[in-house]
Image (cartoon, helix red, strand yellow):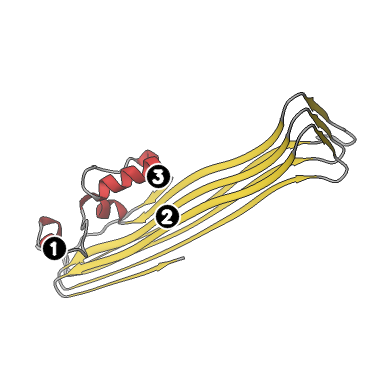
Amino acid sequence: SEIFMTTLFTAIDGTGTEIPSSLVDSWTQTSGDGESASGAASIGVVNYDNSAKAFIGATTEGEKPKVEAAGDIDVKALTDVTTVNFSGSVKNILNKAPINIWSDRRNEIINTKYFNMDDKADKGLGGAALAVRQQNHTEAYIGKGSTVTSGKNTNVDAKTEAWNLAFGAAGGMAKSMALDATVSVNRIDSDTKAHIDGGATVDAGEDVVVKALDDSVTVNLAGAVGISEGTSVGATIGY
């Protein structure tokens, strides 16, 4: 995530070029050109299902595993996932666009070559929709019938680290009217469990630690920009 954000912001502030495709999981983009009217729309739907499990327990009926160690015994499961998804006119907006359009440089930027209307259609319509669902299942446990003996600590640790960036954008230019809309919906379902089952025997020389942690972050960016010499409308929904 740190590498991606560094690349993203260098692209936005103009010190970078294009965002490498290797940093993006999915990217939908479309464009349209016409003399009197132009329209374009893109839709991205992505589903992730991740699973991580660590355990001491029976894999066949009647099995009773035994684990012994002079030091620590660690049963650890980790789900570590980063997802990046773009939909709409993101590339155009990031690579050549209004960097600080609402700053004091607004008028200066609008009059630059990026907003020359000479070759634009009279009316323009743009839309982008992005739906992302991320499901994470992480479990660490000592199962029924198991015997675990450690000279020091016995640790049962389940952790989910999920980082999701979704960026949906619609933008366009037209001479008399520009209409643009963006909808971006994100959902993360994480199930993180750490447990010692009833019927398991755990004997530790020091501590027995059972810990579960869900450290998930989602960043949902959505925007719509319409630019015209007449009427321009932009609408955005992010969830």
Q: Along the horizontal axis of the image, is 189 left or right of 172?
A: right
Q: Earlier in the sequence, mark 3 or mark 1?
A: 3
Q: Please name which of the two marks, 3 or 1, marks the residue nearer to the observer.
A: 1
Measured as percent of width and height from the top left, residue 178 is found at 23, 70
Residue 178, compared with residue 11, is above or below; it is below
Report the residue that reaches farthest toward the front: 206
Q: Secondary structure at mark 2?
A: strand
Amino acid beneath label 2: Ala
The residue carrying mark 3 is: 24
Measured as percent of width and height from the top left, residue 164 is found at 47, 51
Image quadrant assignment for residue 6: top left
| Residue at 81% across, 32% down | 148
Image quadrant assignment for residue 130: bottom left
Which class describes the residues within 10 Å of circle 3: few (<14), some (14-19), or many (20+)?
some
Q: CA distance from mark 3 to mark 2?
A: 10 Å
- Asked if the residue at tag 1 contacts the one at tag 3, i.e. Cβ–Cβ closer than 8 Å, the answer is no
Q: CA distance from mark 3 to mark 1?
A: 30 Å
The residue carrying mark 1 is: 110
| Residue at 74% across, 30% down | 152
Q: Is residue 53 visible to us here? A: yes
Q: Earlier in the sequence, mark 3 or mark 2?
A: 3
Amino acid beneath label 1: Ile
The residue carrying mark 2 is: 166
